[in-house]
Image (spheres, rainbow, N blue to C red):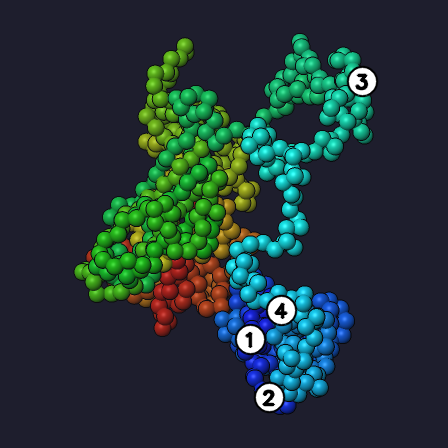
C-alpha cells in the first residue's frame, strides 16, 4: 500500500480504452454498465510512481471544478507498475446511463487520502452507454429511406456532388478556422514592422537586466540631489569643506616632550600627549642580549655535571647502586635532561631512579623497557622518562643542589664477582644564566682584564682562589675571588655578619698553614648558628663505604678548627640535606670535654684485643653532655644499655683486633636498641674490611644483627 502524495495523472487513453470496452450488442440486449480505463501515475518530480498497490477513488462530475459527483466508486485497490495502472469502472458501483445524460462530463481520481487530482474530460466513447436510454429504438433498420420526405434531404449534397471537395482526411495538415482566432490577418499587419526591419533593435530577451523608464525615480533623469527621497542630513563640513568643522579630529603629537627617567615612549594618546611606560622583565625576550647584539652576546648556556665514572652495578641486588653529584648555582633552567649509558647482561631487569634536591619521590627514568645489553639515552630530551615531570618541576628554576641516581639490577645471575655491568651519568641543563655571558667575535675593552675566570659564578676557575657565587667581601671569599681574607670557620663568618644566611662559604682553618681554603656548608640558624659542616655522607641503602682515610681527613680538618661542639643530623631520604633546607629525621649536639676539644680523631683508634662488651672509655668518654634537638624523631636517651652513660667511645662485640672509631647510643626507639656507628670493622679482624654503619637499628647481639638504615648523615663542628 503506497501513499506518496502529490501525484500527476495522464488519462490520454481514457476514451479509447472505454470504447474498446463497449461490446456490440443487440438493441434489445442490456448495455454493459462497466468500462475499462488506463492511466499513468507520476510523482510530483515527474518520474513514474513507485511500483505497488494504491488505494484510489473514481468519480464523474458535471463540471471541471467544484460540485458533487454524479457517480463515484471506491476506495478500490489498483496495481501500478512503472507508473502504469488500469481499472474497471463500475465493478463495485455500476455506471448509470442516466448519470451520463450531461452535455459534458469530467473524470476525477483521488489517490489514498491525498487531494483529488485535476479532473480530465470524458471521451465520446463513454457516451455509448447513453444509448441505453433510447428505449423506443430497440430495433435495427426501423426507418427506411422511402419513409423520409425528399424536401428534408434537399439541403444535403449527394455523394456524386462531393467529388470536387476535399475529404476530412485530406485536411489533417490544415488549421481549422477556429484555430486562427489568435492570429492577425495580413491586412491587419500593414502598420507593423517586418522582422527584417528590426535588426537594429534589441530583442525583449536582451532587456531582462534593464528596468522600464516608468520605473525609474525622478533623480535618475535629473541627477539633482534635491530629487532624492529621505536624503540624510549632511554634516556642516560636507558643505563648508572646513577642517575646523570636523568632529573628533585626531590629536596632533606634542613636540618637545620627554619621558621621565627609566621610561620609554610607547606612543601618542588621542589628545596628542605622549604615552610613556616602563619595561618589565617579562616584556623582554629570554635571551635579549642576543637579540640586541645581533647574536654576538648571549647568556644562554648548556652545562653538565657528571657523576662518578663507571659505577659498578650489583648483580641481582634489589636495593641497587647509587651515585650522587652536586650541581652548582649557574642560573635558571630552560631545559633539563639526564644523559646516561648502561652496560648490563639483560636491560629488561634494570630500573633507574633519579632523586632531585628537595623532592622526596624519585623520577623513574627507565624500567626495563628495552632488550639488549647496552643503553645510551638522553632522558627528558630524546628519550621520555617513565614517571614524573622534570619540566614541570624544574624549568624556570635553579637546579642547584644534590642530585643522586640509583640503578637496580633486579635479575640476578648475569654478571661475575657480584656485579653485572656499569653505568655513567650526567645532569645537563640549558640555562638563562645570571652568572656569566658569552661573547662571540672580537672584544674591545678600554680597561684591563684580570685573570681568565669569572668571579661570582660559583665555579673555581683559572686565576681564582675561591668562588662562592657572589661578589661580597667578608664571607670567606672576596669580591675578586681571593681567599686571602677568608674567615677561619662558619662561626667567625656569622660573628662578622649577623645577617649571613645558611649556604656554601669558603673558609681557611689555619690561614697561611698547610690547610688549603675549603668550600663548606654553613648552618647559620640551628642552635644559634655558626656550624661548619665537615662531612656529608649520603647512603641510600646503608651499604655505601666511606674509607678510613676519608674519615680521618674530615676529622683532622674539623680538629684544626678547634672543635668544642659536634652536631649530627640524619635524614631518611638520601636526596635530602641542609643544601635543600630539608627537615632532618634526628639531630643531636654533643658538648666535648676540655680534654677532647680540638683533638684529631686518631686519638680514638684502638686495635688492642678486648673482652666481650668492653669499652675504650668509661663514664661519659669524650662527651660532657649531649642534647636532642627539637623536631627529632626520637625524644629521649636510651637508658637500658650501659645505663646510657656511653655517649661517645669505642665498643667491641667479640673477637680480636676490632676497630671501632665511634659509637653513639642516642635514644629509645620502638624497635629497641638504636645507635649510630661510624667506621666499624665488621669482619672483626686485622685484615677485615672497613665499613661505615650509620643509623643501625637492633641490638648487635640480637637475632637481627645490624639493620643498616639508608639516608643522609651530616657532621658539623663549632
Q: Which of marks 1 and 4 is in front?
A: 1
Residue 502: x and y in percent read 51, 39
Q: Which of marks 3 and 2 is nearer the N terminus?
A: 2
Q: Is residue 610 left or right of residue 356?
A: left
For label 3, the crowd category at 10 Å Cα-Cα, with few meaning under 14, some 14 to 19 and many 20 or more, is few
Residue 86: x and y in percent read 55, 77
Q: Which of marks 3 and 2 is in front?
A: 2
Q: In this view, does 26 lie above or below 628?
A: below
C-beta proximity under 8 Å, tags 3 and 2? no
Return the mark for residue 236. 3
Residue at the spot 74% in from the left edge and 21% down from the top edge? 223
Q: Which of marks 1 and 3 is nearer the N terminus?
A: 1
Residue to which mark 4 is pinned = 5
Residue to which mark 1 is pinned = 17
504 or 441: which is nearer to us? 441
Q: Which of marks 1 and 2 is in front?
A: 2
Q: Which of marks 1 and 3 is in front?
A: 1
Residue to which mark 2 is pinned = 26
Q: How many marks?
A: 4
Residue 645: x and y in percent read 46, 60
Amino acid at each position: 500500500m503506497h501513499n506518496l502524495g502529490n501525484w500527476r495523472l495522464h488519462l490520454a487513453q481514457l476514451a479509447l480504452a472505454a470504447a474498446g470496452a463497449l461490446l456490440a450488442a443487440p438493441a434489445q440486449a442490456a448495455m454493459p454498465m462497466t468500462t475499462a480505463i488506463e492511466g499513468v501515475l507520476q510523482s510530483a518530480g515527474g518520474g513514474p510512481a513507485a511500483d505497488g498497490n494504491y488505494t484510489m477513488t473514481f468519480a464523474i462530475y458535471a463540471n471541471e471544478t467544484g460540485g458533487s459527483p454524479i457517480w463515484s466508486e471506491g476506495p478500490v485497490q489498483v496495481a501500478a507498475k512503472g507508473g502504469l495502472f488500469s481499472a474497471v469502472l463500475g465493478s463495485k458501483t455500476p455506471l448509470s446511463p442516466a448519470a451520463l445524460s450531461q452535455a459534458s462530463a469530467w473524470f476525477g481520481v483521488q489517490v489514498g487520502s491525498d487531494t483529488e487530482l485535476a479532473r480530465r474530460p470524458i471521451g465520446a466513447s463513454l457516451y455509448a452507454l447513453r444509448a441505453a436510454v433510447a428505449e423506443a429504438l430497440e430495433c435495427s433498420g426501423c426507418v427506411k429511406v422511402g419513409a423520409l420526405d425528399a424536401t428534408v434531404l434537399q439541403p444535403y449534397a449527394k455523394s456524386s456532388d462531393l467529388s470536387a471537395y476535399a475529404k476530412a482526411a485530406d485536411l489533417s495538415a490544415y488549421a481549422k478556422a477556429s484555430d486562427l482566432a489568435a492570429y492577425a490577418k495580413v491586412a491587419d499587419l500593414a502598420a507593423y514592422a517586418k522582422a527584417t526591419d528590426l535588426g537594429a533593435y534589441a530583442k525583449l530577451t536582451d532587456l531582462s537586466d534593464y528596468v522600464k523608464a516608468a520605473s525609474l525615480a525622478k533623480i535618475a533623469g535629473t541627477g539633482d540631489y534635491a530629487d532624492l527621497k529621505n536624503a540624510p542630513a549632511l554634516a556642516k563640513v560636507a558643505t563648508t569643506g572646513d577642517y575646523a568643522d570636523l568632529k573628533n579630529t585626531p590629536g596632533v603629537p606634542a613636540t618637545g616632550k620627554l619621558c621621565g627617567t627609566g621610561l620609554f615612549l610607547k606612543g601618542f594618546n588621542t589628545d596628542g600627549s605622549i604615552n610613556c611606560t616602563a619595561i618589565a622583565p617579562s616584556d623582554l625576550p629570554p635571551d635579549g642580549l642576543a637579540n640586541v647584539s645581533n647574536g654576538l652576546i648571549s647568556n644562554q648556556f648548556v652545562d653538565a655535571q657528571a657523576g662518578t665514572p663507571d659505577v659498578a652495578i650489583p648483580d641481582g641486588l634489589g636495593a641497587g647502586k647509587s651515585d650522587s653529584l652536586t650541581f652548582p648555582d649557574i642560573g635558571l633552567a630552560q631545559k633539563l635532561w639526564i644523559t646516561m649509558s648502561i652496560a648490563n647482561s639483560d636491560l629488561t631487569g634494570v630500573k633507574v631512579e633519579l632523586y632531585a634536591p628537595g623532592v622526596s619521590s624519585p623520577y623513574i627514568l627507565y624500567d626495563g623497557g628495552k632488550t639488549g645489553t647496552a643503553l645510551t639515552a638522553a632522558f627528558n630530551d630524546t628519550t621520555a622518562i617513565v614517571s614524573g615531570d622534570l619540566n614541570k618541576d624544574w624549568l624556570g628554576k635553579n637546579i642547584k643542589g644534590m642530585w643522586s641516581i640509583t640503578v637496580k639490577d633486579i635479575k640476578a645471575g648475569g654478571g661475575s664477582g657480584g656485579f653485572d655491568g656499569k653505568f655513567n651519568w650526567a645532569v645537563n641543563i640549558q640555562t638563562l644564566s645570571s652568572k656569566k655571558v658569552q661573547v662571540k667575535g672580537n672584544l674591545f675593552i678600554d680597561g684591563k682584564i684580570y685573570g681568565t675566570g669569572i668571579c661570582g659564578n660559583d665555579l673555581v676557575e683559572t686565576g681564582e682562589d675561591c668562588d662562592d657565587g657572589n661578589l661580597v667581601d667578608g664571607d670567606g671569599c672576596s669580591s675578586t675571588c681571593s681567599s686571602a681574607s677568608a674567615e677561619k670557620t662558619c662561626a667567625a663568618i656569622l660573628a662578622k655578619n649577623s645577617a649571613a644566611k645558611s649556604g656554601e662559604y669558603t673558609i681557611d682553618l689555619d690561614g697561611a698553614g698547610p690547610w688549603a681554603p675549603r668550600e663548606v656548608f654553613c648552618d647559620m640558624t640551628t642552635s644559634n648558628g655558626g656550624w661548619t659542616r665537615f662531612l656529608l655522607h649520603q647512603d641510600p641503602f646503608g651499604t655505601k663505604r666511606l674509607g678510613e682515610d676519608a674519615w680521618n681527613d674530615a676529622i683532622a680538618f674539623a680538629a684544626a678548627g678547634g672543635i668544642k661542639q659536634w652536631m649530627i643530623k640524619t635524614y631518611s631520604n638520601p636526596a635530602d640535606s641542609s643544601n635543600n633546607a630539608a627537615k632532618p629525621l634526628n639531630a643531636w649536639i654533643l658538648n666535648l670535654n676540655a680534654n677532647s676539644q680540638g683533638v684529631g680523631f686518631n686519638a680514638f683508634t684502638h686495635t688492642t684485643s678486648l673482652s666481650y662488651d668492653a669499652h675504650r672509655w668509661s663514664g661519659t668518654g669524650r662527651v660532657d653532655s649531649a642534647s636532642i634537638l627539637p623536631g627529632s624523631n626520637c625524644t629521649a636517651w636510651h637508658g637500658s644499655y650501659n645505663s646510657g652513660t656511653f655517649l661517645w667511645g669505642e665498643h667491641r662485640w667479640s673477637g680480636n683486633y676490632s676497630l671501632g672509631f665511634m659509637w653513639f647510643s642516642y635514644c629509645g626507639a620502638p624497635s629497641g636498641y638504636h645507635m649510630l656507628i661510624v667506621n666499624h670493622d665488621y669482619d672483626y679482624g686485622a685484615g677485615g674490611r672497613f665499613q661505615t654503619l650509620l643509623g643501625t637499628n637492633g641490638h648487635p647481639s640480637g637475632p637481627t644483627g645490624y639493620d643498616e638504615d639508608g639516608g643522609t648523615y651530616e657532621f658539623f663542628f663549632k
